[in-house]
Image (cartoon, rainbow, N blue to C red):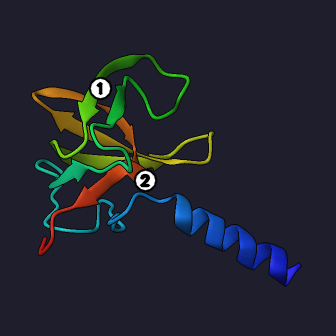
Amino acid sequence: MFKLFMASALIFAAALPVGAQEVGPGVGRTTRSTGYLAYVCTNDVGGTLTLRTGPGKNYRQMRQIRAGNNIRVMDSTRSSDGFEWFKVVHNNKQGWVRSDYVCTHDGE
């Protein structure tokens, strides 16, 4: 059982984007009204992250945000799909993205 647990943890760690740092509403300079600055980080050069109308894959896609683009994280929630989702603002458009593709800037 322990071996299965360890193997699962290693697979999960390998699936995270390179350079991903744990982020959340308590990380960085966060206030309820302004959130904090972060950016989209994917493993693919030219990769994108889907901005959705709600926190889950079952919500409508609004746009794609290219890797490296800045976003402002405003809030977070864990949805029924088991993932943590961030409420973000990108180019004056508010929506939801998967948290595991969001990284903080060094020093924030």
- How packed is label 1: few (under 14 Cα within 10 Å), some, or many (20 or more)? few
Q: What residue would you read off at disc 2?
A: 100
Q: Closer to the camera, 64 or 90?
A: 64
The amino acid sitting under disc 2 is Asp
Q: Is residue 90 left or right of residue 82?
A: left
Query: Toward which corner of the image does residue 54 lie, by quadrant?
Result: top left
Q: Residue at x 16, y 42 (%)?
A: 69
Element class at badge 1? strand
Q: Is residue 85 above or below residue 16?
A: above
Question: As shown in the figure, which amino acid type bears the numbered disc 1?
Answer: Gln
x and y, in percent, of residue 102 in the image: 31, 52
Q: Residue at x 43, y 53 (%)?
A: 100
28 left or right, relative to 48: left
Image coordinates for residue 74, horizontal then vertical, percent: 23, 46
Residue sitting at x 54%, y 68%: 13
Residue sitting at 32 percent across and 37 percent down? 47
Name the residue nearer the viewer: 100 or 81: 100
Image location of residue 57, percent across then percent down: 53, 29
Q: Which mark is residue 39?
A: none
Q: Are marks 1 and 2 in contact (CB under 8 Å)?
A: no
Q: Which residue is denoted by mark 1 in the rendering?
A: 64
Q: Quarter holding the C terminus?
A: bottom left
Q: Secondary structure at mark 2?
A: helix
* Quarter of the figure with the N terminus: bottom right
Q: State how far apart marks 1 and 2 are (Cα).
A: 16 Å
- The residue furthest right is 1
The x, y position of residue 101, in whole percent, is 37, 49
- 35 left or right of 11 in image: left
